[in-house]
Image: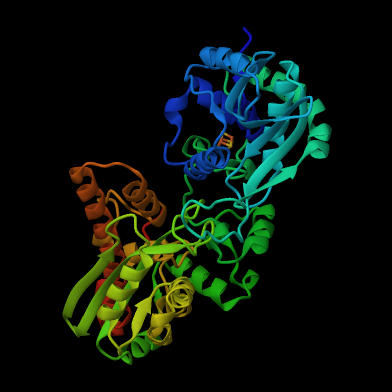
Amino acid sequence: MTHGLSKSRILIHRQCPRRLWLQVYNPALADESTGQPLTEAGTTVGLLARHLHADGVLIDAEDLRSALRQTAQALTVKPRRPLFEATFEHDGVLVRTDLLRPVARGWRMIEVKSSTSIKAYHLEDAAVQSWVLQGAGLPLREQAIAYIDRDFIYTGDGHYQGLLIEQDVVTELTERMPEVPGWVAAARRTLARRKEPDVAPGRQCHDPFPCPFQAHCIPEREGYPVDILPRGGKLAAKLKAEGYTDLREVPAERLTSTLHRRVWQATVNGKPYLDPALARTIRTLAYPRYFLDFETWAPSVPIWAGTRPYQQIPFQWSCHVQESEGRLRHEGFLAEDAADPRPPFTNALLATLGTQGPILVWNKSFEQTRLSELAEALPSHAGRIRRIIDRLVDLLPLAREHYYHPDMLGSWSIKAVLPTIAPELDYADLDVADGSMAQQAFSRLVFENLSDAERASIRHSLLTYCERDTLAMVKVAEHFSMSSADHRTATSGGKRP
Ligand code: SF4
């Protein structure tokens, strides 16, 4: 049986034959939340390309046979106009083309990408595309890839000219196109197999895109793999090559860095490490204490004047304010509508943070950079924002220096630390449970025409998630400031086998 192929199937096969086989014969094993991360950005950038070629014609038939007919008809219309989603078939391979522009004696193919540079897989994608177009008899004179200029600054009012950089790739595709028939044949051979291909997990599971079948192919880690040694990639590779699979088997003398020794010791003992100096440091912090966290969104196509592509735009913050020991209140902000969120975000933030008291964050560079950007964008607030920056206290390096629990498995992210201190505060009960889900939820609020009930539900999920993040920091800081005697009753050892 000859399998019909799309360009995306050929490219999936290039990433991993097993992935294509699973996608066709056992798609239920896929984790829907994993996959190509820029799909939504790609859609937005594709729409932008249409906006920039307002005289273009969209091949809008959904089923591919109708799209082929519609394309053939559009190619005969005079005068010729740009075509979006023109559809072609060659040797059983179907492709849709982002943009075809008429040029002298033929057409220019432009593949529109949402990234800020051309990657190797873009060239493979364009090579398949060109091979099909030429094979289908289209006089293809020029080939280009359009990508996003990261230095573009949006001036507003729909002025997006200059956002996309078009780069000719004729030379690069001339080298790759002869390989395409081999790629097509290999994909067909894989699909003709009755059994799942025997491909060992490796770099291809994450590169160029995270594969949705990782849970199926990669056995769950048991014990304490040597890979958990923080920033210890080379050493871990060496230890694995020598046959060490579990950190507990590694002789202490093989570990020379203080941090590696600490992780090893806690793991071998099955007990957390907590330096009493940490409690002393936390206790020196004055009240009121502010526990702060930002959520940001980085749209591929800038929406608000003065912003760049993929600029992190803060749209939400949560702040737990500890007035004194045991007195806690919560404040929060979430942008109301599609207007630039930065001014109301900043006004509300400045009002809540007042003028004194330490502002505790987890990984200060993120909040600090966002605040510096806000100071630049809103010069009338710059002085007050800079004084906020001066008050930031980073809990992450304190935790890294003074705390480790075996269950953290070499990570000091708040989501790794929290379950070792306040497991009841996990994120499993939340609809929005991490930063990327928060970004997706907010982009729905901005772009989609939602009912009041849907809007209220998404807002509730976002507010609950961000509040949980700062409550987590409060609990962690409280734990860090407890006396050693309190810890002996409050902490437990590692849970892994
Ligand atoms: S998880 Fe890795 S080995 Fe398994 S199908 Fe995906 S890319 Fe291939």
Task: Tell which of 247 and 208 is nearer to you.
Answer: 208
Q: Percent from the top left, x then y, of residue 92?
A: 65, 13
The relative height of residue 232 versus residue 64 in the rendered view (above or below) is: below
Residue 493 showing in the rendered view? no
Task: Tell which of 51 and 323 is nearer to you.
Answer: 51
Residue at the outermost left position: 327
- Relative to 208, is 372 on the left or the right? left
Question: How many numbered marks are there?
Answer: 0
Residue at point 38% right, 50% down? 443
Q: How is the image coloured?
A: rainbow
Q: Percent from the top left, x then y, of residue 434?
A: 37, 55
Image-quarter location of ligand 1: top right
Residue at point 60% right, 14% down? 73
Tell me the quarter of the picture where residue 54 sits: top right
Residue at the outermost front position: 79
Q: Percent from the top left, x then y, of residue 416?
A: 40, 62
The relative height of residue 69 versus residue 465 in the rendered view (above or below) is: above
Residue at point 73% right, 45% down? 167
Q: Give the position of the N terminus as an image quadrant.
A: top right
Tell me the quarter of the picture where residue 141 sits: top right
Task: Tell which of 321 and 347 is nearer to you.
Answer: 347
- Relative to 170, is 494 on the left or the right? left
- Relative to 175, is 348 on the left or the right? left
Q: Percent from the top left, x then y, of residue 319?
A: 27, 73
Residue at the outermost top position: 1
Tell me the quarter of the picture where residue 182 sits: top right
- Relative to 289, is 20 on the left or the right? right
Residue 488 showing in the rendered view? yes
Task: Tell which of 240 and 78 is nearer to you.
Answer: 78
